[in-house]
Amino acid sequence: MSKVNSVRERGIYILPSLFTTAGLFAGFYALIAAVQGRFELAAWALIAAAIFDILDGRVARLLHAESDFGAQYDSMCDMLSFGIAPAVLMYMWALAPLHKAGWMAAFLLAAGAALRLARFNVQLDTQSKKFFNGLPTPGSAMLIATAVLFHEDAGFDPIPWLWFAISVSLAWLMVSNVPFFAGKDVDLKQRKPAILLLIMLVVIAFVMVNPHTFLFVLVLAYCIHGVLLGITGRHKKEIQHDEPDTPDNEAP
């Protein structure tokens, strides 16, 4: 192996890693904001982290810059942004009145995210492009973040025991085998029906008019759809014809 090739193998792809680092910064900012009691700001920071998490994987694939380093670095950053930060936000926002039961539920969220990410890493070469196996960690974090925004906008306080049950359910969904739509096989360069553009515009319009409510509804629908897929089993035929996934900078 030549010296040039050796140097290339030891190097990293800068652009995808910059997006991953930006997501890490947003997750860390969300953690600090949650500790300070600035819950709405923490929620928006988590949403920013999720956007960067989507972009780093897409950029890596578009530039053919997938790497084992990128996948592992992304996974480490996701543990903070979608494991620790949302768990702390959930505890500070809704679970603190439950004392020991509250922090135990928050710990289950963090532990579920860690197990989810570890399982994804060891199954990286066999992952389906159409479906995630278990709720992605950004999905769990986004449900918490958008719930905070929804409650803040509506002006009512969270019900601690309700969110205790939801926290335990999210932790279980992350480590379960419940299928969730991944969308990694969607090719944006191919021609699509014009109706899709209209649907996208309608969704964007709803989000712009009332982001606090509509974002929560969207994420909640995503979490529910996985449970329905698991019950009906309609995803199994598609998985059988799917090809193994390839490493990139996106570890949910």
Image: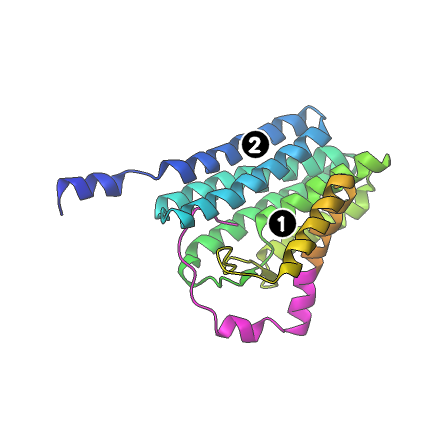
The answer to whether residue 101 is visible is no
Determine which residue is flagged by label 1. Answer: 139
Which of pointers 1 and 2 lies earlier in the amino acid sequence? 2
Q: Position of residue 153 (x, y in %)?
A: 81, 35
Q: Position of residue 227 (x, y in %)?
A: 68, 63
Q: Label 1: state its secondary structure.
A: helix
Q: Position of residue 59 (x, y in %)?
A: 44, 45
Q: Nearer the viewer, residue 208 or 97?
A: 208
Q: Is residue 231 highlighted in magenta? A: yes
Q: Residue at x 41, y 49 (%)?
A: 62
Drawn side of residue 214 relative to residue 185, left or right: right
Q: For residue 205, what is the image quadrant? A: top right
Q: Residue at x 64, y 54 (%)?
A: 197
Residue 172 against residue 128 in the figure, above or below: above
Residues drawn in magenta? 225-252
The answer to whether residue 138 is visible is yes
User: Residue 26: which numbered mark, if any?
Assistant: 2
User: Residue 169: which numbered mark, if any?
Assistant: none
